[in-house]
Image (cartoon, helix red, strand yellow):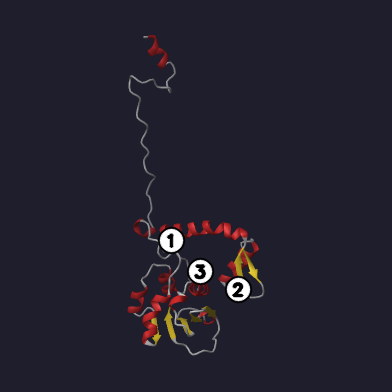
Amino acid sequence: PSLLSKRLGFLESEGIIERVGTTGGFQLTAAGWELKPVVELLGVWGQRWARGRLEDDDFDPDLLMWDIRRRIAVEKLPPERICLCFAFTNAPQEKASYWLLGSSDGVELCVTDPGHDVDLFITTDVRTMTRVWNGDLPLAEKIEDGSIDLHGQTSLRRKFPSWLQLGIFAHVAPAVDGGMRRESEPPAISPPPAPSPEEPNPDRPGRQQGSAAR
């Protein structure tokens, strides 16, 4: 099974999500909705302090394309259906191509060829697209240098960047040094100031009594 199906299975077994009828979709349970703000805060923290520390397993086209599908700006798509084909040059054959069927009514992700003429081909590698999606690389720059190659009508190529809203944490700015800051040692803690001669010191028994005796 793919990484996505493994993660969905784990979340389902833990009672965080549940299946919706016979559609194959999932929805959050009550426990999942309560966990949602915690996950969002962790996502912001990770994007700020640990961004760029992706392992090979994190570059999964299944996860990436499902996230892209739900973050397409539907209101900016043309009213008629269009077919986008994402082709990943470095992915295994079974994960090399994905199709998005989109219109102002919604977006559908297909992992097998839906049989429609493709209006726009997007050819790139998984690592580049993932880093763009996470906000680590600028989309316009990667299109300009050919790392993301668009093939189709000029009007669609121009509109494509406006359809992608990027990941929900892509807007989070990195912390100092790009979120990779290391503290060589903990900050020094200054000791409390010594009491003045006129003030009693409760840490020294007898001092107060001696002062009163004078």
Where residue 162 appears, as percent x and y from the top left, is 39, 76
Q: How far apart are marks 1 and 3 (CA)?
A: 17 Å
Q: Mark 3 points at which residue?
A: 57
Q: Which of marks 1 and 2 is nearer the N terminus?
A: 2
Q: How crowded is mark 2: few (under 14 residues within 10 Å), some or many (20 or more)?
A: few
Q: Distance between the residues labelled 1 and 2?
A: 28 Å
Q: Which residue is drawn at 58% across and 60% down?
A: 33
Tell me if label 3 and label 2 are in contact, CB under 8 Å: no
Query: If the image is split into quadrants, where does the C terminus sit?
Result: top left
Residue 44 in sight from this viewpoint: yes
Q: Distance between the residues labelled 3 and 2?
A: 14 Å
Where residue 145 appears, as percent x and y from the top left, is 33, 78
Helix, strand or loop status at disc 2: loop
Helix, strand or loop status at disc 1: helix
Where residue 114 appears, as percent x and y from the top left, is 55, 86
Q: How crowded is mark 1: few (under 14 residues within 10 Å), some or many (20 or more)?
A: many
